[in-house]
Amino acid sequence: MIAEKFSPYISFSRKEWAALRSNTPLMLTAEEIEELQGINEHMSITEVEEIYLPLIRLLGLHVEGARKLHSVTDQFFRQETPKTPFIIGVAGSVAVGKSTTSRILQALLSYQPGRPKVDLVTTDGFLYPNSVLEEQGLMGKKGFPESYDIKALVQFLSDLKSGNEHVAAPVYSHLHYDIMPEEKIELQSPDIVIIEGINVLQIPKHEGERSPSVYVSDFFDLSLYVDAHESDIERWYLERFRLLKQTAFRQPESFFNRYASMSEEETEAFARDVWHRINRRNLELNIRPTKNRADIIIRKGPDHTVSHIELRKI
């Protein structure tokens, strides 16, 4: 464990972090873990045991602490306020593996004492529809802060934190590369909600507009940032694109079906162009600068396994 004098974080090596698991049991099977992993990731049982179980133990302490604070606060004010969910934000670049991290956390948290109801919502659902992005000339900046309906996302989180028993979120289809207007994710009195997306820790600032007084991260009880070296993220992005070209892109209804017949050379050139023109630029301008706003930073090595954890000092 390293606690640099002028750093807000304490850094744990993989071995040090794994030792914090204590007696936290693993309730997932190898088959269940395989179903939760990304298309070009391999999530081993060892990875879950050494990285995610200590993390679940820590998150469980935070969830219980929030519950107790809510209870004693009600006692102090002699009132009974609605139960509100514990909200966890998960941020990081495109292709870094934050979706897999979120799914693993959701599955493991649902086995915590009392079997809490855990919902997972991605901020992709709060992208503007393609028709709006095309009208505003933003299709080439999809994923940038201005391509999201931040007001709708903030309202959704506000409804959650207000204790509303029923809250709905819009659905985004990666197959159709667009919002599905007829579909919604229904949340019914969740105990824990994981909000996953590249933009969840951003402080949006649009030229010529006043900065909003409330940010997405203001609603989080705890936040995580999944990090890796940029060259590794680029390689993972290219690997994923190649795999999708051989699978999802071949479906006639896929937005990217037009690229399924490209040669290997054309595929490589196209994917690299998208990475450098859009995703890398977004990472450098809007995503990576938010890393140090997270409570926990999960640093990955070249093979997707976690090399160390950084925990914000309390």
Image (spheres, rainbow, N blue to C red):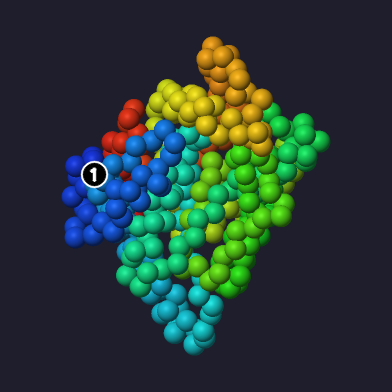
Q: Quadrant of residue 16?
A: top left
Q: Is residue 83 left or right of residue 296?
A: right
Q: Is residue 237 visible?
A: no
Q: Residue furthest right?
A: 135
Find numbered disc 1 in the image and state the secondary structure of the residue it sits on.
Answer: helix
Q: Residue at x 63, y 51 (%)?
A: 171
Q: Residue at x 73, y 39 (%)?
A: 130
| Count of numbered tags | 1
Q: Is residue 92 left or right of residue 156?
A: left
Q: Which of 277/28 is in front?
A: 28
Q: Circle 1 is placed at which residue position?
A: 46
Q: Is residue 306 left or right of residue 173?
A: left
Q: Position of residue 100 (x, y in %)?
A: 42, 44
Q: Which of 205/41 is in front?
A: 41
Q: Is residue 245 left or right of residue 310?
A: right
Q: Residue at x 48, y 28 (%)?
A: 243
| Tag 1: amino acid | Thr
Q: Position of residue 189 (x, y in %)?
A: 53, 71
Q: Position of residue 29 (x, y in %)?
A: 29, 53
Check the picture and name the quadrant holding the C terminus: bottom left
Q: Is residue 264 visible?
A: yes
